[in-house]
Every structure is written in structure tokens, then in C-alpha cells.
Image: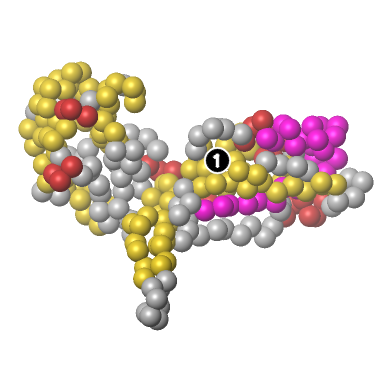
Amino acid sequence: MAGMIKELVAKLIVNEQSTLDFGVYIQYPIVITHPQVDVTSNAIPGHSGDLLTKNHRFQNISQSFTLYATRESTKYSTWSQLSMAINDWLVSDKYQPLYLDTMHEWYWEAILSQPANFTPQNDSEATATVTFNCKPYMRSTDSMKFRPLPSSQKVINKQQESAEPIIHIVGSGDFVLSINDQDFKLNGVDGEIFVDSEEQWIYKHDFKENRASCAVFPNNDFPSLKPGENKIYLKSGTAQKIEYKPNWRRLA
């Protein structure tokens, strides 16, 4: 048993707690699920081969992990108590960052879809499966914090997928943000403004303070950072601060 536990070193991390805090280990092998392109297939009478309609998105994935615990490893006196403690920790009504420490550079945006129910394997050991409904893209841990726009005006996206950044400007008045020779105008800013490209929302302080009326964007598209080199700078306006969260991403 000690040798088995020694090899079960991977852990899940959510909200700064990990499975090891509960005396629980991740059982190998860990199989990572990958997303599928969302395409609608339609059969056409008299035509061989279905007609495919692109939905321009990837489907969410279902990612499962097998949990393992022993009477010695956990402080809970019954497997039901352990199950309830794990579920209290993981249950949420919104996506949460989900980390696997062996892939610490990336995290899923996940919500629990199948809670833990520990089943005894013998007198001293039990296992459970937890399953998460995850967005198809994993996020880079390195892109969780805001950073100032570089003086070089160059931002490098090393991934194969375009990133959907959050841009934060502190200041008042009219601003023009240039990204790859496209002008994103923000007029009548009153103190500060956030441009969230993933959520396609513009706000002040929080989501409830809608500032969509300030925006004049090319083709009504939100800013994105394409793979490779991006040129980004404040073309006009005086800002006390301008920063961005790149939200680097890759397919799971």
C-alpha cells in the first residue's frame, strides 16, 4: 500500500485547496479528454455524404479523474463523510479554475458534473470518480494576472489559437487602442473601463456597470491577439494606466 501511494503523487487543485488536503490521491492512468469541433451533420436524400454545417466552435469536454483514499490517509471516519467533504469543496454554480499539478502551466475552466461517491474496494481502501464539464480551451497559468502594455508595442502569442484578452484602461475621456492596425475606440470613459473579449462585455468596475455605449469597434469585433507577433499601443488619449490580461489558451 505504501508503494502504491508513493506513485499516486498527482493532485487536483481548486480554490487553493488540493485533493491531498483531504488525504485523497489521483489514481493512474490519467486520461486527458480532447475537444471535438462542433459540426452539424445533415443527411440529404439522393446525396452520398452528409452535408456539414460549421458552428464555428469547439464542444465542451467531460474530464474525469479517479480518486483513491485509505483509512490511514484520510481523517474522515466514514467514506460518506469523505465524499461529502470533497463535494462541498468542488460544487459550484459557475466555472472554476481546475489544476492538475502535473500540468501546472495550464488549467481547465470547469464545473463539477459528477460528484464523488467513494466506494470501498476492501476494508481499508476506497475509490471514487469525479467528472467535470470543462470549456474546450485550457488557460495558461501565466496569463492570469494583468500586465502593462509593453513599450515595444509588441505582444507575442506563442500558441496556435488566438487569445481573447481583457484590457483595462484607467483614465477619462476618449481613447483609441490600436491592435494590429485596427482602431478600437472608447469614447466618454469615466474613470476606468474594462474590455473583456471572451465575454464580449465592456464595463466599469464590475459586469453590472455596462459601458458598451462607449465602444466603437471594427466590424463590432472585440480585440484578439493572433498567433505570433501583435502590435498593440494606445494611439490617442491620456491614460493613467493601461494593462491587459492576455488569456493565452490552447485546446485541451
Q: Nearer the viewer, residue 29 or 241?
A: 29
Residue 105 located within the stretch drawn in magenta: no
Q: Amino acid at mark 1?
A: Ile
Q: Is residue 153 above or below residue 171?
A: below
Tell me which corner region of the image, top left, top right, bottom left or bottom right, holds residue 54: bottom left
Q: Which residue, as the protein is rendered here, is positioned at the far front?
A: 45
Q: Position of residue 194 (x, y in %)?
A: 26, 29
Q: Residue at x 67, y 60 (%)?
A: 29
Residue 11 shows in this picture:
no
Residue carrying label 1:
111
Coloring basis for residues: secondary structure
Q: Position of residue 243 (x, y in %)?
A: 25, 33
**Circle count:** 1
**76 in the magenta segment:** yes
Farthest left residue in view: 236
Residue 159 percent location from the top left of the image: 34, 56
Residue 153 falls left or right of residue 10: left
